[in-house]
Amino acid sequence: MSLANSLRVRGIGGTVELALRRAFNFDHVPEHLLSRMVDLRRYDRKHHVNTAGLVELDKLDIDSPSKAHGTRYGGASPWQFRDLLERLPIDASKYTFIDIGSGKGAALFQASDFPFREIIGVEFSPALHDDAVRNLKTFRSDTQKCYKITPVCADATQYVLPEAPWVLFFNCPFDATIWKPVAESLARTPRGTETSYLIHMSPGFLPGVREFVENLYFLKLSSRVEHADIFEFRAGPGPQ
Ligand SMILES: C[S@@+](CC[C@H](N)C(=O)[O-])C[C@H]1O[C@@H](n2cnc3c(N)ncnc32)[C@H](O)[C@@H]1O
């Protein structure tokens, strides 16, 4: 990212902090993780939550056969997330935002800057879900526009979507083995008359997943940006 862009999204303080961490990066943390770490830590301090850091799934008790196909927890970068949501041509107040694989709730809190009808997070690790619930109690924001935030502890393969329209957010939560039943369930769910959207963040993180999602017959690619693919749902089954 250019200096001008970094100043725009991080301000002077964030840009200086990131420059110092880059200069003293003794652990050789990859660049994309370093900037996300700095951005989320700053977000957490400002909003009284703890969403930064990475948590490997093998450190967690998760009673689900899906565990072997899931990815570790790592929260969405706040400025990338905002950039994606601002691209959607929607009246957010009609939409439910659902983060599939919500972890400690980073994307849920960031989404609350938009006036969604409701925000739901679906996370299969009880420990990460508990972190999200704790974070929800301490979360403070001057820019919050949605106050109905519901973390749900469930496996994505079992979760039944609420009434459409939705903005579904997938920040590379699992591989194609889990995408298959999740996609089958999405295909069967009535989609109503409004266009719903699916944001696929970091789609290239796991091999084969981007191709699997972009070939789903009920999705239409709406835009592709550096860090995400955004799809519209085609008209679906059930009452339209
Ligand atoms: C990369 S993190 C994304 C966190 C969050 N969506 C965000 O962007 O801030 C992926 C999350 O998906 C969760 N996950 C993986 N497989 C899952 C499944 N089958 N059902 C529900 N959650 C799952 C992991 O536990 C992890 O918290």
Image: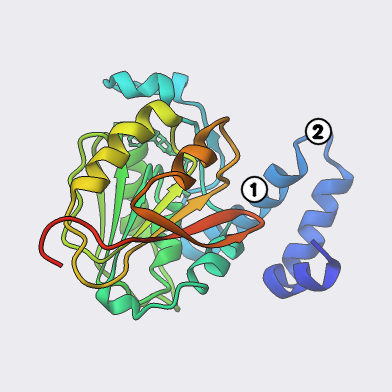
Query: Is 205 positioned to the left or the right of 232 in the image?
Result: right
Estimate how packed mark 2 is, as few (under 14), some (14 to 19) or many (20 or more) residues with alpha carbons within 10 Å: few
Horizontal relation, residue 106 to residue 131: left or right: right
Colour treatment of the image? rainbow
**Residue type at numbered disc 1:** Met
Residue 37 — which label? 1
Query: For the residue marked with disc 2, what is the amino acid?
Result: His
Q: Are marks 1 and 2 in contact (CB under 8 Å)?
A: no
Residue 114 point in image, percent of width and height: 40, 74
Residue 87 x, y percent position in the rendering: 52, 73
Q: Quadrant of the C terminus?
A: bottom left
Residue under label 2, please give it: 28
**234 to 206, vertically: above or below:** below
Which residue is located at x 12 percent, y 58 percent? 238
Which x, y percent locates residue 191? 21, 61
Crowding at mark 1 (Cα within 10 Å: few <14, some 14-19, many 20+): many
Q: Is residue 240 above or below residue 98?
A: below
Is residue 210 placed above or below 237 in the rendered structure? Answer: above
In the image, residue 185 lies at what x, y percent? Answer: 23, 41
Kindly identify the residue that appears in the image at 48 percent across and 48 percent down. Answer: 51
